[in-house]
Amino acid sequence: MTISAPDPFVLPELPTYPQGNQATAGRTLVSKALVAGESTAVFLTLGDSLMSNTVSSTYTPTQAKNQNFNVYDGGLYATVEPLLGCNTNLAQFNSGCFFTRAADALISGAVFQRVIHAPIAVGGSVLSDYAAGGPVAGRFAAAHRRLVANGLTPTHVFIMLGANDTNLGTSQASATLSLQSIIANIRGLSAANIFVARHSIFGLATSAAVQAAHAAVLDPTNKVFTGGDMDSLTSSANYWDNTHFNATGAAAAAVLATSAISAHP
């Protein structure tokens, strides 16, 4: 009897949560070929529901080279929300992700000419879920393999985790260890610039412990930079439920992320 090797592209999922969005019907496939002389950023984004399709409305990209890599099938599509690859609140909302706006801004601001976004965020996740031994710790490696197999090497990783840790009361020491493990996992596979957003708002409450963990792992010599201070968005006007962005909050978060990325392109 021949035993087949496990599929290297299978993404682990968080138990009791739905898989990432894989609804490709009606989407437009685009070429994955890199163009000589064209500055292309390949973003792999991971995190909790704030990094997923949970904005309470959709945004239509203005830039033709704002593109969405689907980590489930290896296809590259013109970006349409809800994004492919991360979780979605589509059962409740026609939902999107703030990072679509950030990708547009990075192109319109001439930071990059093309942005390929590969989202793998999982709603409900906490820092330890992505750390070594966590249920979705292998998500980055599977997505990274899928990108590389399609001729795309991640140039940037954006991490936005911490809201659910605020809700759980995660300690600074535990949060820091988890983030260090996540970054070590990424560094074992990729030399990409890593951005860690300061993000702990849950129900408008923040966690000093989680914020301190975010600060503790920043290390410019290891190309680990801030992804922006999302916890500065303290007004309820930015959220539809005091935790997840509405269109106003998504636009503000995109500005913060774009500024952080532009400082270390």
Image (tube, grey):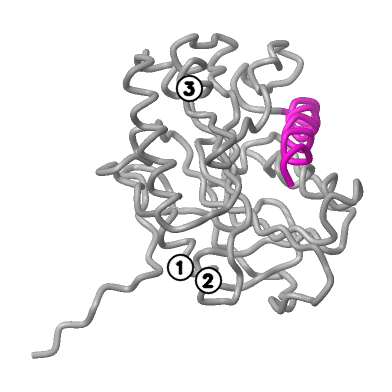
Name the quadrant of the N terminus. bottom left
In the drawing, what numbered circle is on residue 216? 3
Of mark 2 and mark 3, the one earlier in the sequence is: 2
Q: Which residue corresponds to mark 2?
A: 148
Q: Secondary structure at mark 1?
A: helix
Whether residue 156 is visible, yes or no, is: yes
* Residue positioned 59% across, 23% down in the render: 198
Whether residue 62 is in magenta: the answer is: no
**Extreme-bottom residue of the structure:** 1
Residue flagged by tag 1: what amino acid is it? Arg
**Crowd class of label 1 (few under 14; some 14 to 19; many from 20; radius 10 Å):** some
Q: Which residues are magenta?
A: 246-265
Count of marks overlaid on the render: 3
- The picture places residue 252, in percent across and down from the top left corner, at 79, 27
Cβ atoms under marks 1 and 2 closer than 8 Å: yes
- The picture places residue 137, in percent across and down from the top left corner, at 35, 47
Q: Which residue corresponds to mark 1?
A: 145
The quarter holding residue 23 reads bottom right
**Extreme-front residue of the structure:** 221
The quarter holding residue 150 reads bottom right
Whether residue 89 is visible, yes or no, is: no
Residue flagged by tag 3: what amino acid is it? Ala
* Residue positioned 35% across, 70% down in the render: 8
Q: Secondary structure at mark 2?
A: helix
In the drawing, what numbered circle is on residue 215? none
* Residue positioned 41% across, 32% down in the render: 179
Residue flagged by tag 2: what amino acid is it? Val
